[in-house]
Amino acid sequence: MSEKSYGLLKGKKGIIFGPLDENSIAWQIALAAYREGAEFAISNIKVALRLGNVPELAKQCGDAPLIVCDATSEEDLQKTFAELKEKYGQIDFIVHSIGMSPNVRKNKGYTELNYDWYHKTLDVSALSFHRVMAEALKQDALANGASIVGLSYIGAQRTFSSYSDMGDAKALLESIARSFGSRLGHIGARVNTVSQSPTKTTAGTGIAGFDALYDFAEKIAPLGNATAEDCADYVVSLLSDLTRKVTMQNLFHDGGFSTMGISDALLEALYGEKK
């Protein structure tokens, strides 16, 4: 992460959903946003605020307000945006970094999904993104030119067996970003998703075979895997006025992985050094 501040978010106010601990992408986004001059609230569910280290993050970000909110609950979201409006007026950005799959946690194969858990995956990981934006719009909480960013993964476009139903959830997340982006242009608001490299977060490392997936991507990507800190710097650029005409995009932040076919590093790992 850059240590230098460019003042990209000076005067901007917003909310970041999803920080848990120092390994989470949302945690690093919060630090980067604060570095760039933003004021914002930090939000997660009650158990995450208790089990994680989120109060410490709030201190590091200028005693940022902590809002307990289950983003699958319309009632919680109503209270959250009412609180935000009372404190900040209209806000300039929203970061959605929320994702969870009971099927992945329980190592359920894609052809053997528990459908109640499947619904939970879609609700938490994708439909919550729709609910957040719908409530923000309903309460007129978005400032003109606001930027909304959701965190995604290339599993939305390509099949990774161990990613299971999260691939479907990320595909839905990206579709929601496009659909809402087309409907928020009248207030100059942007909606984008960032498709990040495999990242050693608490959630990521819980996926079966994560280490192999991480190593594979590292060998394919010309620039190597992007870290959570790298992602934070990129997201800051999307929250800033420098990208005010970028909307409805899924933007790959993966060291070039998404465009590669194969690499010399992978070939050498599989078959030995070139002769």
Image (cartoon, grey):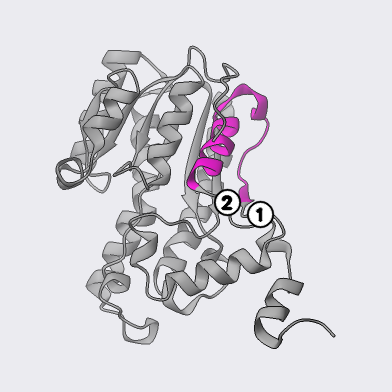
Which of the numbered marks, if any, corresponds to residue 255? 1
Q: Is 168 included in the stretch rendered in magenta?
A: no
Q: Is residue 266 visible?
A: yes
Q: Is residue 188 above or below residue 224?
A: above
Instruction: Report the magenta residues as a range.
Output: 228-252
* Position above or below: 115 against 18: below
Residue that appears at 40% across and 41% down: 26
The local secondary structure at tag 1 comes to: loop
Helix, strand or loop: magenta stretch = helix
Residue 262 in picture, x, y percent from top left: 73, 74
Q: Quadrant of the N terminus?
A: top right
Q: Are marks 1 and 2 in contact (CB under 8 Å)?
A: yes
Q: Which mark is residue 44?
A: none
Q: Is residue 221 above or below residue 75?
A: below
Which one is earlier in the sequence, the residue at label 1 or at label 2?
A: 2
Which residue is at the front of the view, 39 or 227?
Answer: 227
- Amino acid type, label 1: Gly
Of residues 110 and 82, the one nearer the viewer is: 110
The CA distance from mark 1 to mark 2 is: 6 Å
- The residue wearing badge 2 is 226
Q: Position of residue 31 (x, y in %)?
A: 42, 30
